[in-house]
């Protein structure tokens, strides 16, 4: 039987899809960010400065693409004994523009722009009417972003104090952060939680990102280069990168790399860089793994009877590295 590649057998481009520069609350300029990340093998950066979108297409070259994007936040209103900002639930979303020259904000109101952007908030472009943000209207915000040509990612739900019940019902998310270097100690079980969307018949892919601010001014010893997303495409252009993201042709990692994820004759084939455990999920409580404390780089699993999807998760107990894929549809 013909081998079917679940992870496209293409080139892979290392990306940081969440970062902050001097245009919001980061310490590095966009140019400094590009130079630092290219030095570490990155080809793509999504500049997700807070609350306003900035076009960085002038930074693009044959080896680098800047994704036009921004981070949007919604805070729960004060209530009961939760009057302080740090005690209230919030939701942070990254909006990635399919159009590299997108300059209009969605569900916008200048009162919600802070930091350097606040100085020009009244001049920023937006679509629709001015909008007062409401934590209970997250679905409306996501719908508006999708309708305006943005891909929407749910950011760091554990840091945001979001219970699962607040986000598993959301529609229109293409991805969720499973690892965030800036708040890595609060990642909790996000590596596993995103997969539960599949139990609600939704396909949400995992993103690992830095959310770096480089507060100490030292990019080499700060919150950079911890988590990354490997984007699979042979079209290294803005459109090619965005198409791959929309198709969820990527995986999340803190170091482990996938070389092949394929199926043939009812068997799942996984090839990766060395780790200590390769695990495959098939929906519900259907899972199987291969472990070797000295290292393992491949595994072949019979596809579980009744499998509803396939999701691969690799871990290395020696160094704490992880890598995880989207839920692939079962074919054949």
Image (cartoon, rainbow, N blue to C red):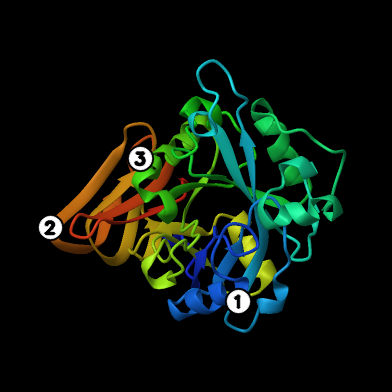
Q: Position of residue 292 (x, y in %)?
A: 14, 57
Q: Which mark is residue 293?
A: 2
- In depth, the one of 198 and 223 nearer the eye is 223
* Quarter of the image where one finds residue 98: bottom right
* Quarter of the image where one finds residue 233: bottom right
Q: How busy is the neighbourhood of tag 3: few (under 14 within 10 Å), some, or many (20 plus)?
A: some
Element type where label 1 sits in the image: helix
Q: Position of residue 213 (x, y in %)?
A: 50, 60
Q: CA distance from mark 3 to mark 2?
A: 24 Å
Residue at the extreme bottom of the image, as rendered: 62
Q: Is residue 112 above or below residue 252?
A: above
* Picture residue at 80% right of the left edge, 59% below the top: 103
Q: Is residue 203 above or below residue 38?
A: above
Is residue 28 shown left or right of residue 188?
Answer: right
Is residue 125 shown left or right of residue 305?
Answer: right
- In depth, the one of 227 and 119 nearer the eye is 119
Q: Disc 2 or 1, which lies upstream in sequence?
A: 1
Is residue 193 shown left or right of residue 77?
Answer: left
In contact (CB < 8 Å): disc 3 and disc 1: no
In contact (CB < 8 Å): disc 2 and disc 1: no
- In depth, the one of 312 and 92 nearer the eye is 92
Q: Disc 3 or 1, which lies upstream in sequence?
A: 1
Is residue 167 shown left or right of residue 99?
Answer: left
Q: Residue at label 3? A: 188
Q: Residue at label 1? A: 31
């Amino acid at each position: 039987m013909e081998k079917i590649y679940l992870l496209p057998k293409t080139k892979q481009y290392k990306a940081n899809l969440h970062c902050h520069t001097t245009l919001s609350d980061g310490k590095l300029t966009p140019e400094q960010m590009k130079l630092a990340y290219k030095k570490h093998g990155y080809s793509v950066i999504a500049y997700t400065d807070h609350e306003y979108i900035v076009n960085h297409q002038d930074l693009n070259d044959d080896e680098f693409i800047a994704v036009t994007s921004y981070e949007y936040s919604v805070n729960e209103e004060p209530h009961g004994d939760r009057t302080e900002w740090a005690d209230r639930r919030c939701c942070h979303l990254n909006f990635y523009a399919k159009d590299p020259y997108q300059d209009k904000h969605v569900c916008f109101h200048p009162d919600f722009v802070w930091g350097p952007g606040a100085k020009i908030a009244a001049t920023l472009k937006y679509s629709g009417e001015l909008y007062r943000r409401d934590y209970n209207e997250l679905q409306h915000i996501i719908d508006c972003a999708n309708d305006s040509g943005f891909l929407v990612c749910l950011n760091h739900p554990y840091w945001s104090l979001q219970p699962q019940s607040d986000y598993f019902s959301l529609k229109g998310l293409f991805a969720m952060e499973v690892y965030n270097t800036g708040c890595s100690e609060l990642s909790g079980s996000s590596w596993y939680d995103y997969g539960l969307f599949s139990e609600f018949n939704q396909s949400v892919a995992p993103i690992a990102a830095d959310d770096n601010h480089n507060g100490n001014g030292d990019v080499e010893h700060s919150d950079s280069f911890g988590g990354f997303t490997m984007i699979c495409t042979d079209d290294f252009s803005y459109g090619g990168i965005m198409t791959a993201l929309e198709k969820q042709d990527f995986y999340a990692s803190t170091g482990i790399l996938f070389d092949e994820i394929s199926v043939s004759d009812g068997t799942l084939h996984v090839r990766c860089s060395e780790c200590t455990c390769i695990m495959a999920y098939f929906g519900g409580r259907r899972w199987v793994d291969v472990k070797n404390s000295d290292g393992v780089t491949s595994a072949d699993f019979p596809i579980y009877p009744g499998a509803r999807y396939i999701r691969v998760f690799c871990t290395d107990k020696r160094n704490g590295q992880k890598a995880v894929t989207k839920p692939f549809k079962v074919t054949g």
